[in-house]
Amino acid sequence: MQPSGAWSRDELDAFLTSDDGRVPLRLACRTPDGGLWMLSLWYRWRAGGFDCATSADADIVEYLRHDDGVSFEASVNEPPYYGVRGGGRATLRPDEEKQLLRSLLERYLGGTDSALATRLLSEDREEIHVRIEPSKLYTWDFSDRM
């Protein structure tokens, strides 16, 4: 999929896999009663989509099972602002061996040697792989304005 906006696909891919793109993905969806919900998840950009991990007990799992439509944004938090936003569909599947979670811990924390990693990787915690397949991508870059 080609993004619209400031960047080419190569530039979008470069951002989402770079240190600058190592920000949480802000993910929005609908709750079963029709409300709106937003949360932040760590992600990995691979094969044109976002791979995120969350606990099997997280509310977002129930919400995405009810309605798989999502919108999202990944952008830097300091000026000059730039990033990507869009919409798409989410699919859920078990991350039984926690391979995705381990990959995300490496990306965001630099490894699995921390109290947080130990807690997240505990044997009694079930993990879900959330795959976001974008149907629309829009990039922006305010570097020239700031």
Image (cartoon, rainbow, N blue to C red):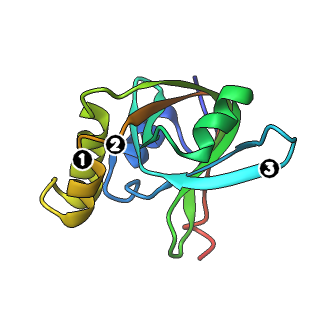
Between circles 3 and 1, the one closer to the viewer is: 1
Quickly name the residue at label 2: 125
Q: Is residue 56 left or right of residue 37?
A: left
Q: Quadrant of the N terminus?
A: top right
Residue type pointed to by label 1: Ser
Q: Quadrant of the C terminus?
A: bottom right
Q: Could you tell me if residue 50 is visible in this image?
A: yes
Mark number displayed over residue 36:
3
Q: Quadrant of residue 54?
A: top left
Quickly name the residue at label 1: 122
Q: Could you tell me if residue 6 is visible in this image?
A: no
Image coords of residue 108 (percent x, y)? 29, 56
Q: What residue is drawn where x is 41% and y is 23%?
A: 47
Q: What residue is drawn where x is 67% and y is 54%?
A: 38
Q: Quadrant of residue 72?
A: top right
Between circles 3 and 2, the one closer to the viewer is: 2
Image coords of residue 61 (percent x, y)? 58, 36
Placement of 1 over or under 76, stated as above or below = above
Q: What residue is drawn where x is 17% and y is 63%?
A: 114
Q: Quadrant of residue 46?
A: top left
Q: Marks 2 and 1: in contact by CB < 8 Å?
A: yes
Q: CA distance from mark 3 to mark 2?
A: 27 Å
Give the mark count: 3
Reading the chain from its start, which is encountered first: label 3 or label 2? Answer: 3
Mark number displayed over residue 72:
none
The local crowd at label 1, few if under 14, some if 14 to 19, many if 20 or more residues have their Cα within 10 Å, is few
Looking at the rendered structure, the secondary structure element under dot 3 is: strand
Placement of 67 over or under 35, stated as above or below = above
